[in-house]
Image (spheres, grey):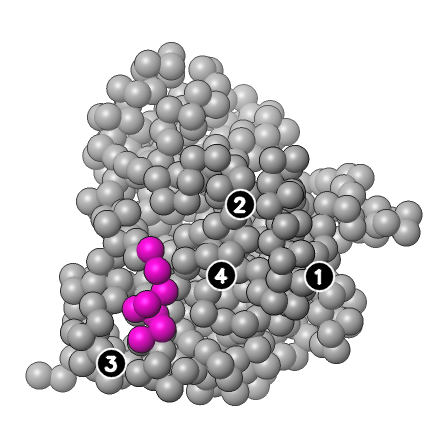
Amino acid sequence: MHPTYQSTLDYMYNRLPMFTRIGAAAYKKDLHNTVELLAALGQPQQSLKCIHVAGTNGKGSTSHMLAAIFQACGYRVGLYTSPHLHDFRERIKTTGNAGEVELQMIPQATVVEFVEQIKPSIEAIEPSFFELTVAMAFHFFAHQNLDIAIIETGLGGRLDSTNVITPLLSIITNIGWDHMNLLGNTLPEIAAEKAGIIKPLVPVVVGEAIPETKPVFEQKAAKEQAPLHWAQDNLSVVGTQASPQGLRVVYINDQNQTTGWDTDLAGLYQQHNLRTVLTAVNLLQKMGFDLPEHQVRRGLSHVKAITNLMGRWQVLRQHPSVVLDVAHNVNGITQVLAQIAQMAPESVHLVMGMVKDKDIAEVLALLPKHFQYYFTQAQLPRALPAEQLLEAAKQVGLQGASFNHVNDAVALALQNAGKNDLVVVCGSVFVVAEVDMTLVKA
């Protein structure tokens, strides 16, 4: 029987260890499998011009912004990100046919053909789900006549499966607490893992650094003779204005010039990612990429339309406002709370689910006592049971109820919300992915 797209996905999900489903057991602590898979495919990554993006938070938004800019400037673009929200193919996108504005997902037939072709190697090498997906992306991109491929790391950097490329530019957005069980228990240790993407002589942009992590990047860049650029030194934020439609940020540069920029990504935290992207664009222009300012602006103001990025302060409706955000760690939740505070809704209904290997206590300690909480769980083995999350929340004085299904929690939050209230769904990519959009639409 000829394999279908669905049977191919079933094979991948069931045959290969998948981090999003089972957590740390799927994490391979070296590049051996990826190197072997790519060798079997004829080293497709070597033909690609790449930008490599790592960081605790913001690497997905940064990657999508860059892809939108290159697309708006007429380049053929590949975009590799993870995890996906609704369809596996969201991870691998490229410029479509001439005249198409939106990046296109890898065709279903291509996924099927690739897995069939490489099955002997899968059986021999036993890669993880992520390792196979990285190989698929590089193989597909190598046949698409791309001008540039933007590659987001999965976990960390040094031992991440994507770290087999020699990019034109490396980008590290920021360092925060996440995946400590795999990356280290101090910020310098985590920074050292992310700094693993810094390559000899390849320029690197670091979005944000703090006193504990700055020396890590300086030492690694010096060792590799990689020119180091600090986005936070290059551009300072002097004003932000957020609306449901997007964000306007005014920066002052190191020459004391002020400029305003607009993006259709509405999260206040995008001011940091935008600054990183603008610093990268400046370097890419110096490398010879034709990125005219008016096209860069067009790309930034149409990121969602071009790349279909979802789940980043995604405003689904108003009165009451409903927002989806994939924030799931201390840094991410802190940013979400800052945006809620700026909006000043009458009441906040927070639908939250998390996975087992996150630092739940640290996140719960941040949450305000006066919000109404709806604790839930995604339908995957790695999800923390809603009851356990509720119990942990009670320990820090939060009030709420637990729901085994995300949409039961969302439905009750909507029922309880007044027209000047705010409903936020966050805590895990997988919780956001399970929200039934028809339930939410006004």
What secondary structure is marked by label 3?
helix
- Front: mark 4 or 2: 2
Is 433 in front, or is 201?
A: 201
In the rendered image, which residue does mark 4 sit on?
Answer: 152
- Front: mark 3 or 1: 1
Residue positioned 33% across, 43% down in the render: 431
Residue positioned 51% across, 56% down in the render: 196
Contact check, label 3 and label 2, Cβ < 8 Å: no
305 sits to left or right of 123: right
Which residue is outermost to the front?
A: 223
In percent of width and height, residue 439 lies at: 34, 44
What secondary structure is marked by label 4?
strand
Contact check, label 3 and label 1, Cβ < 8 Å: no
What secondary structure is marked by label 1?
loop
Rendered position, 380 above or below 164: above
Q: Magenta segment, which residues?
A: 29-36
In the rendered image, which residue does mark 3 sit on?
Answer: 118
Q: Is residue 35 magenta?
A: yes
Identify the mark nearer the N-term, 1 or 4.
4
Q: Could you tell me what secondary structure mostly forms the magenta stretch?
A: helix
Is 354 in front, or is 307?
A: 354
Which numbered marker is on residue 227? Answer: 1
Identify the mark nearer the N-term, 2 or 1.
2
